[in-house]
Image (cartoon, rainbow, N blue to C red):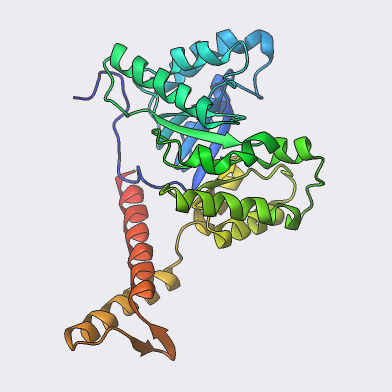
Amino acid sequence: MRRAGTPRRVPGMSLHRTYLFAPGNHPRRSAKALSLAADAVILDLEDAVANAEKPAARRAVLDAAARPRRGRLYVRVNAMSTEWGYADLVAMTVPGIDGIVLPKLESADEIKAADWLIGALERQNGLPPGGIDLIPIVETAAGFMQLEAIARAGTRVRRLAFGAGDFTLDLSIIWTRDELELLAYRSAFVAASRAAGLEAPLDTVWVDLQDQDGFARSATRGRGLGFQGKMCIHPDQVMVANRIFGPDDQAVARARRVIAAFAEAEAQGLASIQLDGRFIDYPIVHAARRVVAQAEEIAAAENAE
């Protein structure tokens, strides 16, 4: 049964194209973010909040969680190694919060500890077991070297996130517009996630707010590498990322033709065909079905608004 005051879940809950950050201690910007078409909003208790305001920011986030919203609500808590991390987790494992984003994750033991604590708080607060999602952001060299262990830790984590801002700072990497210096690291996130049976990861933010074309290029690059969505830091980035990480009409039409043609061939005992000069077999059909399923979920979410 849904608890009173907890926003109703709507179609599109499995879409992860866009995660929009907003400062948790700024009610107006939080309300604005929660009204937008992001698949999820991350209210931030970490970098966006001054140290002196962190305890008070928790109450502001809980107030925001009680208001209507379009998508899911996550909270980026402070790292567990900080003086605020534990209290953040305790305060945010409550009805109305869909998930927690854990920054600067550096070991499997750390994510296991967070998972255990959240599980204990779910039981204490009468929440469904495993109902609070947990997304670790790996953004240091130490965390990257433990990426496989983190992915295979056997926790409630369904997807990882890559944080290039702190990562490039930690490694003294120059973060350029074409992001070629990030290629190997991004690919490692996708491979480690797949090998561990997790969903595709979430790609890093794009920090140059004046360069919308650069953001679109970064999102396109991330999707091409196998990420399922992108973290955003400005409302203007949401619709761009939603478009890039969702199939366009042409791709959906093509996918439907592939599915129909293969079904006809399969009925005749064939498992490989050509369509418009392109080879089609089971992997291509599985990919086409994925495209159609995502398009249908996006349409259902839009129609429910």
Q: Which quadrant of the view contains residue 249?
A: bottom left
Q: Residue at x 55, y 58 (%)?
A: 223
In this picture, is 287 found above or below 135? below
In this picture, is 185 found above or below 163? below
Q: What is the x, y in percent for residue 305?
A: 34, 43
Q: Residue at x 63, y 41 (%)?
A: 144
Q: What is the x, y in percent for residue 17?
A: 48, 49
Q: Residue at x 46, y 52 (%)?
A: 195
Q: Nearer the viewer, residue 201 or 144?
A: 144
Res. 82 in view: yes
Q: Is residue 55 left or right of residue 7?
A: right
Res. 200 in view: no
In this picture, is 19 found above or below 275? above
Q: Residue at x 18, y 24 (%)?
A: 1
In this picture, is 285 found above or below 89? below
Q: Is residue 209 left or right of residue 264?
A: right
Q: What is the x, y in percent for residue 181?
A: 75, 54
